[in-house]
Image (spheres, rainbow, N blue to C red):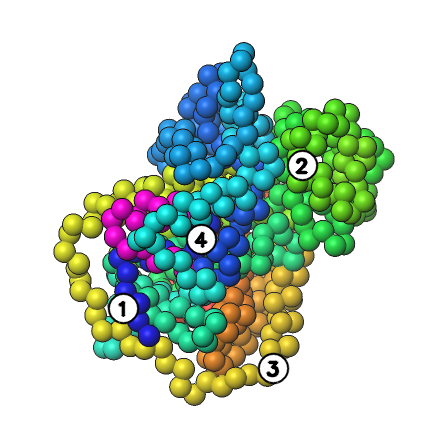
Amino acid sequence: MVIKTDFLIIGSGIAGLSLALKAAALGTVAIITKKEQAESNTNYAQGGVAAVISPDDSFAFHIEDTLKAGAGLCHRDAVELLVHDGPERVRELIEWGVEFTYRQDSKKNVLDLGREGGHSHNRIVHARDLTGRIVEQSLLQAIKQQRNIRIFEQHVAIDLITEHHLDQKPADNYVPLHCWGAYVFDEPQGIIVQFLARATVLATGGCGQIYLHTTNPQIATGDGIAMAYRAGAKIANLEFMQFHPTTLYHPRANSFLISEAVRGFGGILKTQAGIPFMKKYHPMGELAPRDIVARAIDAELKKSGNDCVYLDITHKNSEEIKTHFPHIYENCLNYNIDITSQPIPVVPAAHYMCGGVITDLHGKTTIHNLYACGEVSCTGVHGANRLASNSLLEAVVFAYQVSDEIARQINKPIEPLIPSIPQWNDEGTFNHEEWILLSHDKEEVQRLMWDYVGIVRSNLRLKRALRRINLISREIENFYKKTTVTSAIIELRNLVLVAKLIVNCALYRKESRGLHFTTDYPEANDAQWRKDTVIFQKKGKLIFLNETAIDEK
Ligand code: FAD
Ligand code: SIN
């Protein structure tokens, strides 16, 4: 089956939906999304959207804070674009129906601005502590009014259609130049559909599920990075996985996030003995950049042998706590923790991938007609560590940039014409009953990544992880080739591939910077390593830009 559309958007989080609302004015839009339409990282965002709104704040301050957090790897032009465009994109979200929280200021109703780690000023626009859910619902509502947009739920993109898939295969050393769409698994019908489009956009979000403990929902398996890598696109900075310092420590809580806004509101991190410790690690204390807070907690846990530290907000007015953080309050209460009178047990968990598919300032990847925006992309904004609440902002700013670019392209003749693309070939595959073996593989990868590729790394641990992940990866590739596709195998194949790429990038960077800390090279080395780690794949080999290839087999 073939579905033709002007624009194919893979993913229905803030990046995909905000882009679709713009692109609908230019042509037909198909959004494919692998679960229900709202299921995304976006839906779980709590803190908010960073933007310069307050008269006390300035673009220069927001730029400086972002660059400082990024530890020398941010691209200044991308950061400037992000920050300057921020207020306009927030206004647009409000126009699309997002109801942010307001407060009274000298009889005027103004946006309530929260504070988070690494920010020198209050600039987090939020909808209490449910920002993501409100944004997601509002955008989906706005999309319902658009006749040009169709959402295909339970549709999982498997691979991008590039020159590799043509009937007549190009020469072996050919680098793919064009993307014509994607092969997509229509889960309810159990068939593979070709979605063909003039422009294809990856808005597939992050990859937190690669780790055993993560704030990310099940959908975050790194599919976009994996598809782009297999297609030959350039990818950068995968060693910079951000760990959120504070998720609820409880056997049933599934790493539920305790927003950084709680620390912005005055929450204090304490040891089990009730002793505050953050000032030992950074002058900004609880509001230091995230990498520093996560490492400080890790160090305290290793020193004490305890399972968690505590976030204490009990000194604040309990009614104000409930008003600002109703979702966190209710959720903790479900686990018999009353945050107005008890400190919250917290531990770090994998949260945000700062690297991703390389794009320019218009969201263009290194493959023609393939764009990326949101968490899947590496625009240069986050460098070695993302500043809190800059990612929802990045998603809307760069979705806008993509829409601007496709508006420029739309009047050009379609070039090259979409060639004849072969149907998905599943000859020789069979339904496999041994899924149980692979489900163990998933958990093993998650555990390896958690134990050996976490907040503090070393060559020994990384090499051990890589040896095992390479083995599992081979098993899964063999299994994938022999079986009919299922969502589970598509995701597992992607998850293992991205895990492998993260470990390779982490081994490659021989210094500590931002989120990448290794005991073998504990200092930053600006002379040699103040540069992005850029990788791509050619003929099954992982290549670091300007370096020799690593045989992946
Ligand atoms: P997502 O919102 O993750 O959407 C990805 C979409 O792609 C989903 O619809 C998914 O189903 C779909 N998809 C993926 N793979 C496929 C495939 N193969 N086929 C089809 N569809 C696919 N950032 C902030 O700036 N402020 C915050 O306060 C904040 N809080 C957060 C709290 C939590 C708990 C989490 C997890 C993240 C938070 N973040 C926050 C980060 C932020 O939410 C994400 O970076 C952002 O929402 C990513 O948006 P996105 O549109 O790129 O991806
Ligand atoms: C949070 O609310 O702490 C999450 C903010 C973010 O990840 O940007």
Nearer the N terminus, badge 3 or badge 1? 1
The residues bearing labels 4 and 3 have C-alpha atoms spaced at a distance of: 32 Å
Spot occupied by residue 458 in the image (x, y as percentages of width and height): 62, 52
215 relative to 170 in the view: left or right = right
Does the beta carbon at disc 4 come under 8 Å from ligand 1?
yes
The residue where tag 3 is placed is: 434
| Residue named by callout 2 | 326
Residue indicated by mark 1: 163
Residue type, mark 2 in image: Pro
Q: Secondary structure at mark 1?
A: helix
Three-letter amino acid code at the position of disc 1: Glu
Q: Report if residue 270 is visible in the image.
A: no
Dot 3 or dot 2: first in sequence order is 2
Q: CA distance from mark 3 to mark 1?
A: 33 Å
The residue nearer to you, when weighing 340 against 101, is 101
Q: Is residue 20 within the magenta segment?
A: yes
Q: Is residue 197 left or right of residue 322?
A: left
Q: Earlier in the sequence, mark 1 or mark 4?
A: 4
Q: Magenta stretch: give its range.
A: 14-32
Query: Going 45% across and 25% down the picture, which residue do you hit?
Result: 52
Q: CA distance from mark 1 to mark 4?
A: 27 Å
